Image (tube, grey):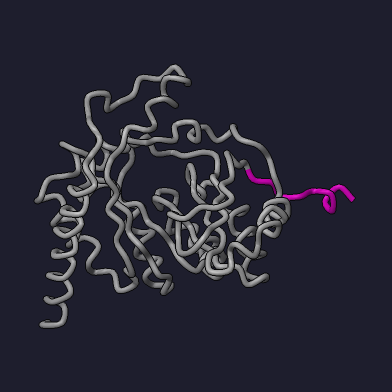
Amino acid sequence: MEEECKVLKGRIHSIESFGTVDGPGVRFVVFFQGCPMRCLYCHNPDTWMPDGGIKITSEELLEEYRRNQTFYRNGGITATGGEPLLQLPFLTELFTKAKEEGIHTCLDTSGIVYRKSRDEEFQKLFSCLDLVLLDIKHSTEEEHQKLTGQSQKHILEFADALEKAGIPMVVRHVVVPGITDGEDHLKRLGHLIGRYRNLKGLEVLPYHTMGKVKYEKLGMTYPLENVDNLDAAKAKEARAVVLNAIREVRKNKRVE
């Protein structure tokens, strides 16, 4: 009887009912609690601790989705965070149930939690996953560690696994003045991701300081206090550099 009463619950930070920037169409966006990354420009430090948020079942989340289902006709559910992959079993259950109802599933992740030793678990997630928004933080290992406090290794292994599974991937990259806005870096980034056959899009996002207020409320020092917002036009220029580098990689592959 006790086993029957056990229901898997996830820790969720918050929900956005009508998201328009985290995947195609209008989305039901679920912000998962917990993240091992400590990105200097993170605007959601309140999602870092894994024991925060509220406990909720996948069915309760789907009930919330169904209330406004007509608005999601061309959208679906997006899991973001935080880092959703920290709660892999719960995420897989949520997306499995969503696919059973014909709901489009999208995962916004850094991929940092992926391990080859757990590939069987990840394959279960892949079987119910329609799209991944993969956050690539930097183009080199050394600078990636400085920026996030984590190695880039497992992120690239996750990207490899997505390619092997044939899951469409959109790369997201935040351009931060003085950190990720250099032309050499942007070219390296393009060369790094251009080899992925499942790469279907590129979102280059301008750094903003809107997260400062959260740090103040949490009594934390904002790491990039003296860094100003990046102009949207600069982000557009940076995207063009990355795209040109991607084209170089793909052109060379065709020649080979």
Residue extending furthest top? 219
Using the image, determine if residue 178 lies above or below residue 110: above
Taking the spot 27% from the left edge, 27% from the top edge, the residue there is: 224
Q: What residue range appears in magenta?
A: 1-10
Residue lying at 11% horizontally and 76% vertically, measured from the top left: 252
Q: In which quarter of the image is residue 70?
A: bottom right
Image position of 143 (left or right of 6): left
Answer with the quarter of the image where residue 97 lies.
bottom right
Query: Is 173 in front, or is 198?
Result: 173
- Which residue is drawn at the image coordinates 51% and 38% (left, top)? 34
- Looking at the image, residue 141 sits to the left or right of residue 81; the answer is left
Residue 183 shown left or right of residue 47 in the figure: left
Q: At 32% from the left edge and 66% from the top edge, which residue is drawn? A: 201
Residue 123, given in percent of the width and then of the height, sits at 52, 66
Q: How many labels does the image show?
A: 0
Verify whether residue 7 appears in magenta: yes
Q: Which of the image's four quarters has the C terminus? A: bottom left
Q: Residue 237, how many percent across, how many down?
A: 15, 54
Percent position of residue 110, x then y: 39, 50
Nearer to me, 118 or 19: 19
Q: Is residue 9 magenta?
A: yes
In the rendered structure, the answer to whether residue 36 lies left or right of residue 196 reads right
